[in-house]
């Protein structure tokens, strides 16, 4: 009995030392703590039905939330972090911000599906240091799993080590991103300062040489098994049931991967078969899975510094494809006819490029209208101010009837590529006169005043510019 009491005393003393060491400094990726503080605060500000994206860093670096918000019409928060984190950690972050009507999209790295209860040193160090708040929400059984997996030196380091790190303060979190939410900061390394207000890190750089070498890689395969571990199934099912109970919905989809010799989802072969088998296994277990995995299996030039980290160009293309999938499979919206690649190019245009594109489009339309009048003796008539999308006339694809295909190959679209009826090309004509404008373009004002002041609409000043005949000047 005395021996048992002594043993119990030592055990509980050891456990207490471990428990109270949680949150102490230990070498880990502490930048993730600030990342999640900002993400959670940003999500809480949304206040309505939203899309939540969550996975490892293939989505932290590979999602443009601005693009998805514009393409789907839903506000979005990117809750992605690191593939080394446990599924339960990701689920916990989502549960803090999810509410009724939310759509949760998880493009998990393949390693998540086969993980067991065994904890890696990375998970132990990070969860017991900066992730301690999450860890302390666990029950005794889960806590004991971490306790028994940790060596004594680890919690001595947290308890008595001299290392420290300064985290982002509460007020700084609240004041983070009070400016334009779509603006992405420059790359400042693995740091919340590299992240925009949506929770994305968009790096406007080309692939480094190490990543370019994957182009002809013959041994690199992202997926070694199509099985789903019992641990993943148990955790994911519990999470899915929680979301269903609150009126939210979970969908799994596919991570960004480099298309290479050993992992090419665009042609038949072993990798395609394994991903297809994984897809079937998930569906058979009762999970919702969306999108064609080949849509996120991209060429190497779309990546940045690891084989899971897309650069900004890749993130925009992937996000357009993901948006199309969400619109089609979840929101029941019609398919967009314009290709994802072309729309991605339009999104990536800078302010000066947007201006140049609009002027080029307007000139093409003016020339086509001139040729039409030369042949038919009048301009194509409009209802009022017609456009692809318009607040003041007819919205339709053929918004200047009769120009396509004889006088112009296709009617151009404003490069913002949105459906806002006040931010489009608009056209008006009674047959005798015409006016064609780029509308809602006040941001172009400084450039157009300097370069093409004669195009500024005398009625709308800098909010519109274009071409018109003499009789339409005051329209």
Image (cartoon, helix red, strand yellow):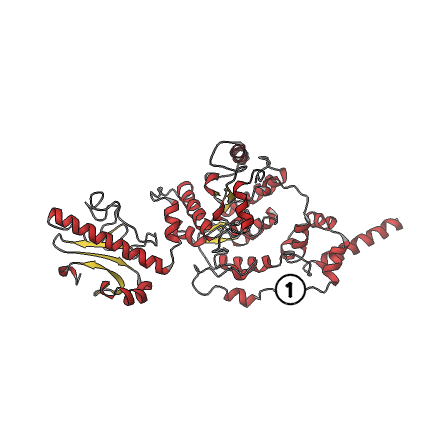
Residue 312 point in image, percent of width and height: 46, 53
In the displayed structure, does residue 28 sit left or right of residue 465?
Answer: right
Residue 472 point in image, percent of width and height: 15, 59
In the displayed structure, does residue 448 sit left or right of residue 28?
Answer: left
Q: Nearer the viewer, residue 341 or 473?
A: 341
* Tally of numbered discs: 1
| Badge 1 element | loop
Question: Disc 1 designates what residue?
Answer: 165
Would you say residue 109 is visible in this rendering?
yes
In the displayed structure, does residue 397 sit left or right of residue 429?
Answer: right
- Using the image, determine if residue 105 lies above or below residue 196: above
Q: Nearer the viewer, residue 138 or 427?
A: 427
Name which quarter of the figure residue 117 lies in.
top right
Return the residue found at the far right.
2
Residue 346 point in image, percent of width and height: 36, 52
Residue occupying image coordinates x 74% and y 48%: 148
* Disc 1 packing (10 Å; few <14; some 14–19; many ≥20): few
Q: Nearer the viewer, residue 269 or 181?
A: 269
In the displayed structure, does residue 61 sit left or right of residue 401?
Answer: right
Residue occupying image coordinates x 48% and y 59%: 196
Would you say residue 248 is visible in this rendering?
no
* Quadrant occupied by the C terminus: bottom left
Q: Nearer the viewer, residue 381 or 326?
A: 381
Return the residue found at the far left.
377
Residue 104 point in image, percent of width and height: 49, 47
């Amino acid at each position: 009995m005395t021996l048992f009491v002594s043993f119990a005393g030592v055990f509980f003393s050891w456990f207490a030392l471990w428990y109270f060491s949680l949150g102490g400094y230990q070498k880990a990726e502490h930048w993730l703590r600030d990342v999640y503080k900002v993400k959670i605060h940003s999500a809480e500000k949304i206040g309505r039905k939203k899309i939540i994206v969550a996975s490892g860093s293939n989505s932290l670096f590979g999602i443009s939330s601005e693009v998805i918000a514009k393409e789907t019409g839903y506000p979005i928060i990117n809750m992605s972090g690191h593939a080394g984190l446990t599924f339960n950690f990701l689920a916990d972050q989502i549960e803090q911000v999810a509410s009724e009507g939310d759509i949760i999209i998880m493009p998990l790295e393949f390693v998540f599906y086969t993980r067991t209860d065994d904890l890696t040193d990375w998970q132990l160090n990070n969860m017991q240091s900066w992730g301690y708040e999450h860890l302390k929400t666990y029950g005794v059984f889960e806590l004991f799993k971490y306790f028994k997996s940790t060596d004594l030196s680890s919690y001595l380091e947290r308890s008595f080590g001299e290392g420290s790190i300064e985290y982002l303060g509460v007020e700084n979190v609240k004041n983070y991103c009070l400016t334009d939410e779509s603006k992405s900061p420059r790359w400042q390394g693995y740091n919340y300062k590299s992240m925009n207000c949506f929770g994305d890190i968009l790096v406007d750089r080309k692939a480094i040489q190490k990543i370019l070498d994957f182009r002809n890689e013959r041994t690199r395969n992202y997926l070694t098994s199509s099985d789903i571990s019992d641990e993943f199934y148990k955790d994911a099912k519990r999470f899915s049931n929680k979301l269903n109970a609150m009126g939210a919905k979970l969908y799994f989809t596919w991570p960004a991967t480099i298309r290479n010799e050993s992992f090419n989802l665009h042609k038949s072969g072993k990798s395609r078969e394994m991903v297809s088998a994984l897809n079937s296994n998930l569906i058979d277990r009762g999970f919702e899975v969306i999108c064609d995995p080949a849509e996120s299996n991209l060429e190497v030039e779309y990546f940045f510094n690891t084989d899971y980290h897309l650069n900004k160009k890749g993130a925009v293309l992937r996000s357009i494809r993901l948006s199309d999938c969400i619109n089609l499979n979840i929101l029941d919206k019609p398919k967009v006819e314009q290709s994802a690649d072309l729309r991605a190019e339009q999104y990536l245009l800078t302010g000066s490029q947007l201006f140049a594109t609009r002027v080029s489009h307007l000139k093409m339309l003016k020339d086509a209208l001139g040729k039409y009048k030369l042949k038919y003796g009048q301009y194509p008539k409009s209802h009022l101010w017609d456009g692809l999308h318009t607040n003041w006339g007819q919205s339709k694809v053929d918004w200047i009837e009769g120009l396509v295909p004889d006088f112009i190959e296709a009617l151009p679209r404003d490069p913002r590529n949105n459906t806002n009826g006040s931010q489009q090309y608009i056209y008006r004509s009674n047959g005798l006169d015409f006016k064609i404008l780029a509308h809602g373009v006040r941001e172009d004002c400084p450039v157009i005043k300097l370069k093409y002041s004669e195009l500024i609409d005398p009625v709308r000043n800098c909010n519109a510019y274009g071409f018109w005949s003499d009789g339409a000047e005051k329209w």
